[in-house]
Amino acid sequence: MKQLLYEEIACRMIKKIDAGEWQIGQKLPGELELSRLYGVGRSTVREALNLLLEKGMIVKKNGSGSYVRLSSPTLNNPLNQLNSIGEMIQAAGCVPKSIWYRLEHGIADGETGKELDLPAGEPVVIMLRGREADRIPVAFSCNIFPEKYVGNLFDSGVEGKMFSLLQERCGIRIHHAETRISGLNKSREWDRMAWEFLKSSIVMLRQLHYDSEGRKIFCSWDYLNTEVIELNLTRDVRE
């Protein structure tokens, strides 16, 4: 059967991806530029892109464009297990990378102080960072720690796993976390920052982490790219 024109264009695009000319995480040229590149109309390019989308080769982000998709399996995040985002990325055979946004020492506001049982004026460490897996943005996090627990531990960045650093450098072992799940609220600054970084469907995990002694060690807002991360949970029927 003769290959349709849009199928031919899709095959040529796939060859660029397979050859590494268009790499994972890279934004593709726009429809107009692709039309000029291949000498076809925009409708043909659009059909070719839709075919790549169906094959899982690219992902389309509203208002941003088309990107070469992560070629590894979907990242799996079992909600009944407390794993770091870095561990989740590595378990999928991908390379994790932190994209630093901001680290500051400040004073707990009323909401944070109440959540962490901190008195008024207590110093805290606020860490904002994005996470990538093979150059695909997969998560954005805001972590707030009482300064009395971590000091300047994160001032020069996070090398390795955060849970391991807390245990090795601070003698703190994270035991469990209380987690609430919600959607995005763009009236909040961190939600807007997460959207700017991920530009995808997002779910937010609001988490309060405890150590083995029951102390509240830090709270976090973890925004996950659900186009890449698969959330799952086993639920039992109550007898």
Image (cartoon, rainbow, N blue to C red):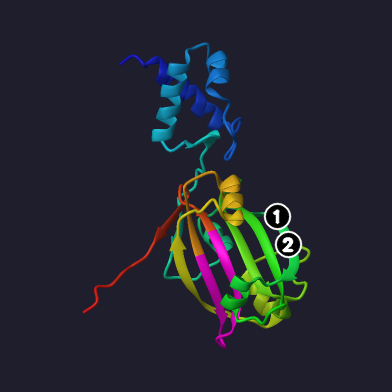
Q: Is residue 14 left or right of residue 167?
A: left
Q: Visible in this render: residue 134?
A: no
Q: Is residue 139 above or below residue 236?
A: above
Q: Position of residue 34 (x, y in %)?
A: 55, 20
Q: Is residue 219 magenta?
A: yes
- Magenta residues (range): 206-222
Q: Visible in this render: residue 157?
A: yes
Name the secondary structure under disc 1. strand
- Answer yes or no: do the residues labelled 2 and 1 have beta carbons within 8 Å? yes
Q: Amino acid at mark 2?
A: Leu
Which residue shows up at 39% across the image and 34% down it? 54
Q: Which residue is mark 1?
A: 100
Which residue shows up at 55% across the image and 75% down it? 209
Q: Nearer the viewer, residue 73 or 123?
A: 123
Name the secondary structure under disc 2. strand
Q: Is residue 89 left or right of residue 239?
A: right
Q: Nearer the viewer, residue 76 or 19?
A: 76
Q: Amino acid at mark 1?
A: Trp
Q: Nearer the viewer, mark 2 or mark 1?
A: 2
Main SS of residues in magenta? strand
Q: Position of residue 199 (x, y in %)?
A: 54, 44
Q: Position of residue 221 (x, y in %)?
A: 56, 63
The crowd level at tag 2 (other Cα within 10 Å; few <14, some 14-19, many 20+) is: some
Q: Which residue is mark 2?
A: 103
The crowd level at tag 1 (other Cα within 10 Å; few <14, some 14-19, many 20+) is: few
Q: Is residue 223 magenta?
A: no
